[in-house]
Image: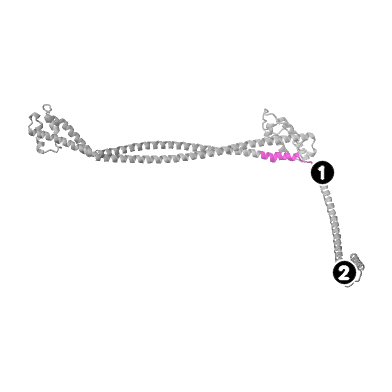
């Protein structure tokens, strides 16, 4: 019987179709020697959801109505229509079994898919955790690098401060000398030259001298001359006497000497000053480089922390995905186990009941088979007894033959012994009776041999 076409709607689970009246069915089952439980197991095949989805309702109703008069009848009592009905029921059983197996196979594939996804999720989590460890190690390295860079900045700042202090202390004398030199040069070229040359405006001579006086005190000059400078310088060149000219000239020489002295001092300290300036510049450059390195280390640390933050988020997501797998796997295995149980129950109950009824024979046939079996066993026993008797006779015959052979062997042995005795006697008698003729001796030997043989 072919399954119904795919466009046929699946029938909803319904109660078994109309069966023969309960009493009539019970009587039929009792007559056939079939239990109601076995009948029910086979009937449930025709109302199974898989059967409802594969076979039309009218076909299943037809088979169900003829169930008690087909498969419940012993195999040796069935007619051709009943055999056809049993074959169609067997087709339904096979299709239901196939459908249950296909359902189980589908669930097994789902479980395998979920298990495969678990392996992928675990591998992904392992990879993300490894990546997170790498970013954490990188962050630790960046933190160490920033710490080192910060310490380098602090050291560079301390070095710069030290070099600047050294420069300040070392350049203090030169700075003072330069300031004095500048003051002397400006004063000489300014107030002193105006007074010396008489080039001052009316009423300003005292102002020029007043500005010159504190500078002049720093000059190494004879006190008497220094005292006379005011009167000499306050005069116009034409009004100055020889002494005044000497005083002015000596003052000019003192300015020149002081400026030369300060210049020599500056020249002598220039190399050390330049070295201190270079040391400060180097320390400043080192600090700037350390600052840049610190900024770079800080930026690298920020980037590493951002990567670590992203890595933590990825690991968290992967763990969540793996956790979500567990209920999915549980559901898949539960559905698989349910299909497995349905299939096993169908095989153990419905299919087993069908197989039992399909090959069941009648009580009459069972008695016939028992009688035939007993007759066969009796015939086999008789045949075995006859074979045993024949074997005994054969054994007796073989024993007689063996006994006769032993007698023949004994006779042959006796004959050989007699021949040996005759030969010995002949050998012993030969020297004594040489006159006896050979014919007589031979005759006696033959007679003796014949007598021995007869005995």
Residue 354 is covered by the magenta coloring: yes
Label 2 vs label 1: CA separation? Answer: 86 Å
In which quadrant of the rendered view does residue 154 lie? top left
In which quadrant of the rendered view does residue 175 lie? top left
Q: How many marks?
A: 2
Numbered tag placed on residue 433 in the rendering: none
Residue 42 is covered by the magenta coloring: no
**In the image shown, does 4 or 203 lie closer to the viewer?**
203
Whether residue 271 appears in this view of the structure is yes
- Quadrant housing the N terminus: top right
Residue that lies at the very extreme toward the top in this rendered image? 202
- Quadrant housing the C terminus: bottom right
Q: Which residue is mark 1?
A: 368
Q: Position of residue 268 (x, y in %)?
A: 22, 39
Q: Is the C-beta separation of discs 2 and 1 under 8 Å?
A: no
**In the image shown, does 411 or 373 lie closer to the viewer?**
411
Query: Residue 215 vs residue 95: left or right?
Result: left
Q: Which residue is painted at 61% across and 36% down in the image?
A: 109
Query: Residue 362 vs residue 161: left or right?
Result: right
Q: Which residue is mark 2?
A: 426
Q: Which residues are magenta?
A: 343-372
Q: Position of residue 72 (x, y in %)?
A: 76, 38
Element on which disc 1 rests: helix
Q: Position of residue 388 (x, y in %)?
A: 83, 53
Q: Position of residue 7 (x, y in %)?
A: 67, 27
Whether residue 323 appears in this view of the structure is no
Q: Main secondary structure of the magenta part?
A: helix
Query: Residue 238 vs residue 405: left or right?
Result: left
Element on which disc 2 rests: helix
Query: Residue 113 vs residue 438: left or right?
Result: left
């Amino acid at each position: 019987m072919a399954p119904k076409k795919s466009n046929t709607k699946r029938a909803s689970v319904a109660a078994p179709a109309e069966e023969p009246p309960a009493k009539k069915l019970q009587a039929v089952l009792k007559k056939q020697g079939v239990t109601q439980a076995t009948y029910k197991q086979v009937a449930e095949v025709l109302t199974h959801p898989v059967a409802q989805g594969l076979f039309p309702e009218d076909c299943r109703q037809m088979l169900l109505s003829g169930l008690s008069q087909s498969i419940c009848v012993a195999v040796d009592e069935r007619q051709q229509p009943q055999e056809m009905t049993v074959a169609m029921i067997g087709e339904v059983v096979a299709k239901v079994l196939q459908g249950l197996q296909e359902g189980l196979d589908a669930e097994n594939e789902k479980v395998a898919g979920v298990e495969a996804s678990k392996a992928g999720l675990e591998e992904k989590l392992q990879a993300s955790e490894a990546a997170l460890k790498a970013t954490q190690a990188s962050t630790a390295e960046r933190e160490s690098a920033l710490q080192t860079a910060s310490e380098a900045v602090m050291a560079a700042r301390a070095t710069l401060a030290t070099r600047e202090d050294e420069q300040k202390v070392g350049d203090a004398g030169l700075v003072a000398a330069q300031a004095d030199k500048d003051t002397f040069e400006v004063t000489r070229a300014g107030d002193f030259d105006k007074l010396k040359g008489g080039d001052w405006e009316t009423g300003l001579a005292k102002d020029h001298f007043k500005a010159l006086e504190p500078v002049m005190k720093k000059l190494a000059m004879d006190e008497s001359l220094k005292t006379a400078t005011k009167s000499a310088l306050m005069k116009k060149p034409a009004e100055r006497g020889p002494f005044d000219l000497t005083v002015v000239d000596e003052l000019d020489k003192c300015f020149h000497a002081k400026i030369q002295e300060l210049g020599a001092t500056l020249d002598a300290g220039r190399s050390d000053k330049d070295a201190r300036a270079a040391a400060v510049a180097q320390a400043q450059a080192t600090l700037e480089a350390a600052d840049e390195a610190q900024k770079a280390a800080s930026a690298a640390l920020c980037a590493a922390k951002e990567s670590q933050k992203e890595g933590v988020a990825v690991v968290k997501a992967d763990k969540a995905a793996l956790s979500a797998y567990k209920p999915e796997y549980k559901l898949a295995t539960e559905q698989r186990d349910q299909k497995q149980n349905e299939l096993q129950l169908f095989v153990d109950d419905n299919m087993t009941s069908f197989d039992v009824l399909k090959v069941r024979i009648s009580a009459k046939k069972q008695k016939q088979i028992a009688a035939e079996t007993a007759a066969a066993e009796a015939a086999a026993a008789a045949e075995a007894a006859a074979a045993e008797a024949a074997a005994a006779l054969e054994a007796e015959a073989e024993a007689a033959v063996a006994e006769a052979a032993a007698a023949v062997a004994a006779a042959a042995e006796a004959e050989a012994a007699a021949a040996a005795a005759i030969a010995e006697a002949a050998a012993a008698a030969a020297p004594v009776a040489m006159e006896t003729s050979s014919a007589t001796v031979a005759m006696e030997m033959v007679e003796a041999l014949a007598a021995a043989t007869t005995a």
